[in-house]
Amino acid sequence: MGALDYIFYFCTVPTTKTKLKSMQTVEIKVKMDCDGCERKVRNAVATMRGVKSVEINRKQSKVSVEGYVDANKVLKKVQETGKKKAEFWPYVPQHVVTYPYASGVYDKRAPANCVRTSQTFPAASSQDSQDQLLNFFNEDNVNSCSIM
């Protein structure tokens, strides 16, 4: 049998093979008001091929899908249920972000100890931005820090 399987492998056309997906957890932010919304989202996602588990936290408006799935397909499936404002989970723990209190990062609707993932402060790599930072604490600057 081994020789026949070996020959059969080389004779078949490999175009029907699909790329194997890795096990991952996809987190999506979806506004759900009632049990019907939650059930509709759970049923839509649970029927997808490769889904191992679905966890829904209605208080945080969070859907966690674990399995061998594509993240974009899960998001699309949730949006097909009528939840057009569904998006990937935009929050990370506060200790992970470099500037957690920068404008655009702090969100009042975020869960406790979480902030948005966007970083608003670019790295100070240019000479002009470094000069601005140094001149901020300069004694000649009228608007400088008064603690010095």
Image (spheres, rainbow, N blue to C red):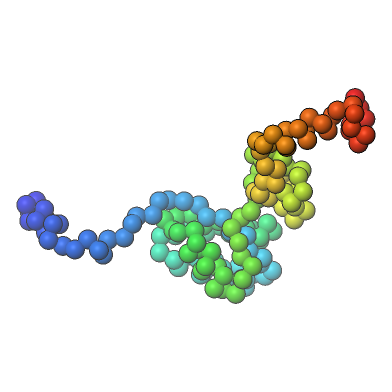
Would you identify the image quadrant in which residue 34 lies? bottom right
Rendered-image quadrant of the C terminus: top right
Q: Position of residue 42 (x, y in %)?
A: 54, 66
Above or below for 91 versus 136 = below
Front-most of 46 and 107?
107
Side of 135 where 67 appears, left or right: left
Query: Disc count in the image?
Result: 0
| Residue 76 image point, x, y percent | 52, 67
Q: Quadrant of residue 145?
A: top right
Q: Residue furthest top?
A: 148
Residue 115 makes an appearance in the image:
no
Q: Residue at x 72, y 49 (%)?
A: 105
Viewer-side residue, 147 vs 131: 131
Residue located 25% across and 63% down the image: 15
User: Can the viewer see residue 84?
Assistant: yes
In the image, residue 113 sits, relative to residue 133, either above or below, namely: below
Q: Is residue 44 above or below residue 140?
A: below
- For the N terminus, which image quadrant? bottom left
Rendered location of residue 44, percent (x, y): 51, 70
Q: Nearer the viewer, residue 78 or 138?
A: 138
Q: Residue at x 56, y 55 (%)?
A: 27
On the rendered structure, is 74 left or right of 18?
A: right
Viewer-side residue, 112 vs 56: 112
Looking at the rendering, which quadrant does residue 131 occupy? Answer: top right
Residue at 76% x, 45% y is 102
Q: Residue 51, percent across and down?
A: 44, 60
